[in-house]
Image (cartoon, rainbow, N blue to C red):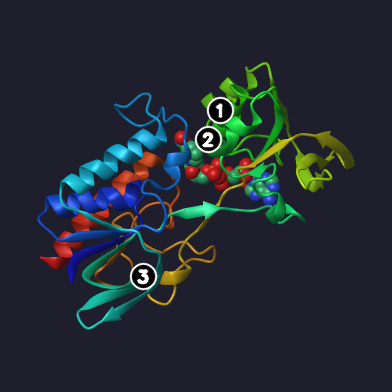
Amino acid sequence: MYDILVVGGGPAGLTAALYAARAGKSVAVLEQAAPGGQIINAPLVENYPALPHVSGADFAEALQNQAEALGVELLYEEAVRAEKIGPGFRVTTDGGAHDCRALVLAPGVRHRCLGLEGEEELTGNGLSYCAVCDGAFYAGKDVAVVGGGDTALQDALFLAGLCRSVRVLVRRDRFRGEALRARQLMARENVTVLFQTTVEGLERDGAGNLRGLVLRREGRETALPVEGLFLAVGQEPNTAAFAPLVELDGDGYILAGEDTATGVPGVFAAGDARQKAVRQLATAVGDGAAAALAACRWLD
Ligand code: NAP
């Protein structure tokens, strides 16, 4: 039985784990994919205090190393259920079950889809949700990015350095993301931003690869030939496994305040999957620290 089990090895979960380990608790982190969470997809993080230029992957690796050096155990398993068992909790995974005295839920979020016909089949054949992973396949080509948030801005800036042209398709008349990044993007010569534009269809060539988009703009449909489409239209929380244990809001985010305490004593929620106003690397790390210290106080 662990003192503290952390679900999710992103910045929030790994920070919670390292704080708990430094407080002398036995800690394990359940991670279904690679440690680091969404930040590993960020080519460059420029707004984290005291680290003016760091790649998301380097940040994640350093955080993982720091946690493991403190004795944190990383378990590569997917949590499928969490429940109260006696005085503690049990998390069932695809590889077994783990018991703990206190539970920190930091499962993060996953990308949202557009729901267009062919979206699934085209994923990996012209359609991507990760510019930093797949951008190199589109070097010198014409691509489009859908979305107006920070992820879309970040992805479009990254792709502008690789691709011949980048069209940014924003459904509203303005960006949702940071103004400084939006200005940097608008200044790039090979970037065109189309506001009030939605994607209505995906066109495939004979080999099943993306060859173009059907756009709706000012009430009219137009065709846009592109070889790559990057979707950055927001996220959904990975919280279905925890719904029976903790309360979620209508969008599936875990209800917990800035102190990270859920309605269940001994269960804390940290990071992007918590209902909150600001989802940034800095706030994820802050959540992780708060959750670990709250869990330690609860245990002691
Ligand atoms: P987001 O902020 O939720 O933005 C999603 C974007 O996609 C919005 O422009 C939204 O339009 C658009 N959208 C949603 N559904 C759409 C649809 N069906 N069709 C077309 N467009 C659609 O998501 P995000 O950019 O992934 O960011 C998530 C969180 O992470 C945010 O809190 C963000 O600040 C943070 N983040 C921070 C950084 C950083 O370095 N500071 C980097 C990446 C992400 P509307 O505006 O009309 O809703």
Residue 255 in the image, given as x and y percentages of width and height: 41, 64
Amino acid carrying mark 1 in the image = Phe
Cα–Cα gap, marks 2 and 1: 7 Å
Mark 1 Cα within 10 Å, few/some/many (few <14, many 20+)? Answer: some
Mark 3 and mark 1: span between their CA atoms? 37 Å
Residue found at x 26% / y 75% = 89
The quarter of the rendering in which ligand 1 is drawn is top right
Instruction: Name the residue beneath numbered marker 3.
Output: 95
Could you say whether the residue bearing mark 3 is in a helix, strand or loop? loop
Please determine whether, in this image, residue 174 is positioned above or below residue 18: above
Residue 158 badge? 1
Residue found at the very far right of the displayed protein: 220
User: Which quarter of the picture shows residue 146?
Assistant: top right
Mark in front: 2 vs 3: 3
Label located before the other in sequence (2 or 3):
3
Identify which residue, 72 or 179, lies in the foreground: 72
Nearest to the observer: residue 200 or residue 251: 200
Residue 247 visible in the snapshot: no
* Mark 3 nearby-residue class (10 Å; few <14, some 14–19, many ≥20): few
Name the foreground residue: 208 vs 252. 208
Residue 201, percent across and down? Answer: 81, 48
Label disc, if present, on residue 26 of the rendered structure? none
Residues at marks 2 and 3, CA–CA distance in whole angstroms: 30 Å
Q: Residues within 10 Å of mark 2 (few under 14, many from 20)?
A: some
Q: Are marks 2 and 1 in contact (CB under 8 Å)?
A: yes
Toward the bottom, the furthest residue is: 86
Counting residues from the N terminus, which is met first, the one under dot 2 or under dot 1?
Answer: 2
Residue under the image location 38 percent in, 72 percent down:
246
State the mark number for residue 132. Answer: 2
Q: Amino acid at mark 2?
A: Val
